Image (cartoon, grey):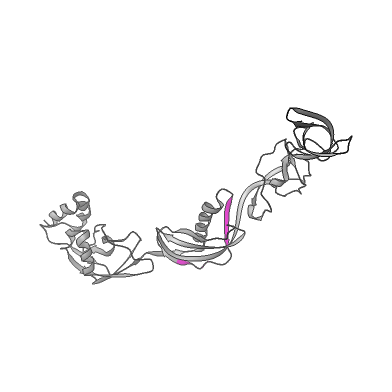
Amino acid sequence: MQLRPHILLPLLLILGNEGIAHCLGAGEPFTLCLRDAAAVSSEGVFLDQIVAVADGASTMRVRVADAPAFGKTVVLSRSQVMDRLKVAVPTLVAAAWSGAERIAISRRCRTLGEAELKDLLTASLQRDQVRDKGELQLRMLRAWTPVQVPDEPVDVKIVDLPTSGVNASFIVRFDLVVQREIVGTWQVALNAQVMREVWVTRTPLKRGQPLVDLIRERRDLLALRDTPWEGSPDPALEIKESIPSGNPLYTRAVGLRAVVHRGQTAEALLRDGAMSISLKVEVLEEGEPGQTVRVRNPATRREFRGRVLNEQTIQLSL
């Protein structure tokens, strides 16, 4: 029985190597034509990439060798290909051969441009450095010269960053990786922004005012002088320093509303075990609950420090 080449693949899938060997034993050998060149991926070198059946039909997807390293070319003679097939597909050893005497095998490649590299760097630094702090945006300080990379999904592995991490301007060193193969190492200088919505004052706010007239705007966190406040406006909170309009609201500028004020008379409590003493004192500075303030005994003019409990009570500490 003589098998047409176009049914080889279906038979291999149904019968396996031993079954197709039995079928082929009764017919004339089919001809495999060795190509003179082939470009492959990192998966390896497959039979259907290096040979063609004489009448143009497709042949079997059988792995016959490892792929060469990227940028390298491996040359295999026809006899070397046949030797490798003895192990991979013994049924094809007796086939007739034609075509080139040797084949040059290299890796498929493509060009990696600036836009794709910037996307790769942004994704890597966002995932491992910036995380959920904001949306990372990068700009290259110098034009990127396109390079050849394998025609496969490429990833970036960061090799070196400043100790302070992602800054407004910094240099990053990285590997381009395909599967587990390092294609090469490069270094680029970058400008970065980490964009996030923060609270911004709509009008000037003075110390002691409640948190009013605030809006949310996207700002670059790397350009801010301090940590932006991320809470929600609350009547118990107030501004602790004057802020011009259009400025971000920083954490240091927000605190609990002061409940005692300078010049106010409050009740001071002094406890020592079972003993408890209460006296009227003059408050010398404003304070919020839990804050320590200075107070003075009007009779003796002696000053003490105490912790604010509420609007009328301060617990003294000697």
Residue 240, x across and y down, in percent: 75, 44
| 303 on left or right of 248 | right
Residue 291, x across and y down, in percent: 74, 39
**143 inside magenta stretch:** yes
2, 173: nearer the viewer:
173
Residue 211, x across and y down, in percent: 73, 40
Quadrant of residue 181 within the rendered picture: bottom left
Q: Which residues are magenta?
A: 132-147
Would you place residue 52 above or below residue 316 in this image?
A: below
| 10 on left or right of 153 | left
56, 294: nearer the viewer:
294
10, 296: nearer the viewer:
296
- Quadrant containing the C terminus is top right
186, 119: nearer the viewer:
186
Residue 147, x across and y down, in percent: 46, 67
Residue at image point 24% right, 63% down: 52
Q: How many marks?
A: 0
Would you place residue 310 above or below residue 217 in this image?
A: above
Would you place residue 291 above or below residue 59 in this image?
A: above
